[in-house]
Amino acid sequence: MKMIIAIVQDKDSQRLLTELVEHNFRATKLASTGGFLKSGNTTFMIGTDDYRVDKALEVIKKNCQSREQLVAPVSPMGGNADSYVPYPVEIQVGGATVFVLPIEQFLQF
């Protein structure tokens, strides 16, 4: 048994949840916040049998593609203003950060 923890951008979360349900994966959906952009993320916890991990990863990859986005940088507060960029910067967002962990025991009450 494995626990898949997938951190995805909020924009991808509903589409991913729909696909997970269609492929008979049970998932717990948690609201989370990213540290870099301080924007909303969704963390999915998915418990599955070892032989279904590849299918779950395929579903996550299909529904959580990265894309380019313009972001206005936050001004430095008491920091070094030399490295501050005063105009929007294009960065890569989206995709998924995924952890696959072994589960020693699974109980459901």
Image: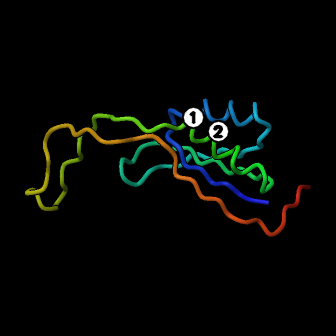
Amino acid type indicated by mark 1: Asn
- Name the residue beneath numbered marker 1: 63
Query: Which residue is found at the position 49% from the left and 40% from the top?
Result: 9
Residue 66, image x, y percentages: 43, 39
The label shown at residue 105 is none
Residue 69 placement: quadrant? top left
The answer to whether residue 63 is above or below residue 50 is above
- The C terminus - image quarter: bottom right
Amino acid type indicated by mark 2: Val
The answer to whether residue 104 is left or right of residue 13 is right
Residue 63, image x, y percentages: 57, 34
Residue 22, image x, y percentages: 75, 30
The label shown at residue 59 is 2
Is there CB contact under 8 Å for labels 1 and 2?
yes
Query: Which residue is found at the position 76% from the left and 35% from the top?
Result: 23
Viewer-proximal residue, 100 or 80? 100
Viewer-proximal residue, 73 or 47? 47
